[in-house]
Amino acid sequence: MGSPWKAISDGNRRKILMLLKKRDMNPTAIAKHFDFTLPGLSAHLRILKDANLVIERKQGQHVIYSLNKKGSVEMIRFFVNVWGYESYAMYFKQQQHNLLKDEDTGPKSTSKSRTSIQR
């Protein structure tokens, strides 16, 4: 597994993550936002996938990329610890628990629950 820190050190890869935040996309749709070739994009996507920041899935003949929110938990936890955001620590711990629970039980129900953040 690659380093998520190294993966986000490149501005193009950060832009890819921001695009995938909006919606899941195939490489052709992602490439429309950049000036480099599909093989160049493929290298960036491979680095993000190896760093566990994106998920690749087959949809028919197409490959679709989406954010792997679970993969960013390590980075979030680091900043929580560095800057002492104790009030956020509980929030992120609950979010991590929810991500792991969702992975075990499948998609969430239609009702949304929110954990409040106390400052």
Image: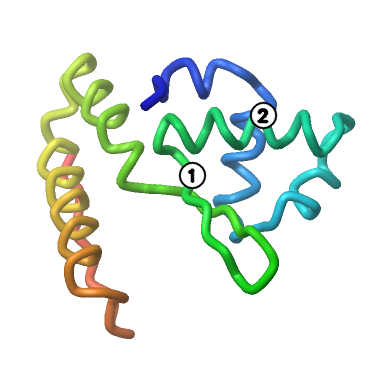
* Picture quadrant of residue 15: top right
- Residue lying at the far front in this picture: please name it: 61
Q: Is residue 64 left or right of residue 75?
A: right
Find disc 2 in the rendering and name its residue. Answer: 43
> Residue 82: which numbered mark, if any?
none
Q: Where is the N terminus found, in terms of image quarters? A: top left
Number of numbered callouts drawn: 2
Q: Position of residue 112 (x, y in %)?
A: 28, 76
Q: Where is the C terminus found, in terms of image quarters? A: top left
At 19% from the left edge and 49% from the top edge, which residue is drawn? 96
At 59% from the left edge and 50% from the top edge, which residue is drawn? 20
Question: SS at mark 2?
Answer: helix
- Residue lying at the far bottom in this picture: please name it: 110
At 81% from the left edge and 39% from the top edge, which residue is drawn? 38
Pointer 1 local density, CA inside 10 Å: few below 14, some 14–19, many at least 20: many
The front one of 90 and 71 is: 71
Find disc 1 in the rendering and name its residue. Answer: 54
Q: Is residue 74 left or right of residue 17?
A: left
Q: Nearer the viewer, mark 1 or mark 2?
A: 2
Question: SS at mark 1?
Answer: strand
Q: Amino acid at mark 2?
A: Ala
Determine whether 26 is above or below 71 in the image: below
Task: Report, in whole angstroms, how far the alpha carbon at label 1 lies from the one at label 2.
Answer: 13 Å
Q: Position of residue 56 (x, y in %)?
A: 52, 52
Image coloring type? rainbow
Q: Position of residue 2 (x, y in %)?
A: 41, 23
Q: Is residue 42 left or right of residue 37?
A: left
The front one of 65 and 84 is: 65
Instruction: Kindly check if marks 1 and 2 are in contact, taking CB atoms under 8 A apart as contact.
Output: no
